[in-house]
Image: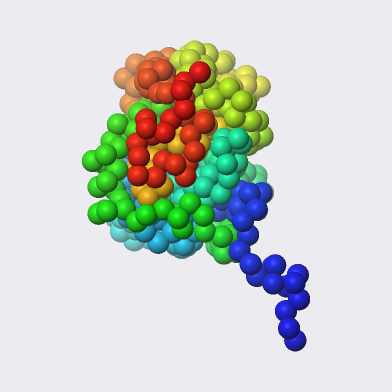
Amino acid sequence: MPDTSRERNRKRPHTRLGVVAASSLAGTAVEWYDFFLYGTASTLVFNKLYFPSHDPLVGTVLAFATYAVGFLARPLGAVVLGHLGDRKGRRSTLISSLLLMGASTFLIALLPTYEAVGVLAPLLLVVCRLVQGFALGGEWGGAVLLVSEHGGSARRAFWSSWPNVGPPLGNLLAAGVLAVLGAAMPSAQFLSWGWRLAFGLSAVLVLIGLWLRLYVAETPLFHDAPKPQGLPAGVVIRKHWRSVLLAAATRFGENAGFYLFSLFVITYVTTVLKMDSSVGLTAVLVGQACAVVTIPLFALLADRVGRRPIYVVASVATVVWAFVFFALVDTRSPGLIMVAVAGGLLIFAAYSSVIGAFFAELFPTEVRYSGVSLAYNLASVLAGSLAPIIAIGLYAKFGTGYAIGAYLAVMGLISLVASLLAKETKSVDLGSVAGKTVEEVRAPVD
């Protein structure tokens, strides 16, 4: 029978912004679920099963060290997957990154423990973590570009903010799944096999994300852009290194804060304050839910006032909240701990509302995938990967959370300086950036 028009429409790749944004969000949320599931499990499972130690803090440090290994692989993923994204297309590269992430996370569910195979267990865990980091290195940039290159400038921050909902939504799912499993079974069963269910669930989530991405069209800007002369990453480093450094610096407060507010806080509550892990997990769940809701709302504001004002206010708030956060957490009040985490993740939401649009507006189309991926992951390595380890080291030396607060305040100051140095980019036409520097096409600053 001949296809009806409705059947033909179902087969045609989608170009509507709502569908494209939903596809980007779904895939990004799945990948960040996988990535954050490892981080959350580091504080609850891996420090016991894969890095046994008489000192719980030492086991946690070792588990976080492998967590940081995933970040080290992200720049390599940014280069390789960024190359494919600029040469072959955003859509096909995103499908590849999703499959890599899903496969590595599912394998973690099957890994034997230290008690079963000795040192081979943490080595296998590190290999899976490296693959996770490699896949994530090319995920965010492609997800943002898939949205931003489909639409105009009027609401670019709003539409490109949806992939940024992926990290808190993925973390929300990861913490939620572990919390439900931990509450539904005795501690011994959870440590024995219950935690593996959370990693096995990744296979189902990957299939959902893959199905959505298969039905999204390639961006029109990629089709029209000239192919880069030479390696895209090389072009970015030679011609756009200032934009890479500036963009990365604007993320220091956001990235360090996010991992302290959503990951380290669980370790701090359980290991330092000697409280039940459910207190930290519940606070993270509430805070991540606040971030999921408010990121698009902040983005609507950014489309009106610009990217720079949002960055400046969020950076100042990071410096202040760095100390308020530990003052609230140290009260040992579950309610105030929840306020501390929610406040920190609201600041993260403000940053996240503008990152996608701002990064995309800094680079020409032919190397945009490589440019945004390098800038994003450079900050992740320098700020995010080290934050939990530095936090543990500072507490071990000074015995107070305020030392960690001072570190976070410095990260916020770096973002503030970078934000003040940045020029407003909200009126930039992404199509006109091709072959030019941003300075040549940037509208006058208000």
Q: Residue 176: percent from the left, percent from the top? A: 62, 44
Q: Which of these two is toward me, 185 or 379?
A: 379
Residue 79 horizontal side relative to residue 256, left or right: left
Q: Which of these two is toward me, 202 or 137?
A: 137
Name the residue located 30 percent from the left edge and 37 percent from the top edge. Answer: 240
Q: Residue 197: percent from the left, percent from the top? A: 57, 57
Residue 281 horizontal side relative to residue 129, left or right: right
Q: Residue 282: percent from the left, percent from the top? A: 63, 34
Q: Which of these two is toward me, 252 or 409?
A: 252
Q: Is residue 322 above or below residue 136?
A: above
Name the residue located 56 percent from the left edge and 49 percent from the top edge. Answer: 150
Q: Quadrant of residue 164?
A: top right
Residue 331 appears in the rendering = yes
Q: Residue 321: percent from the left, percent from the top? A: 51, 16
Name the residue located 50 percent from the left edge and 18 percent from the top edge. Answer: 446
Name the residue located 57 percent from the left edge and 41 percent from the top edge. Answer: 152
Q: Quadrant of the N terminus?
A: bottom right
Residue 274 appears in the rendering = no
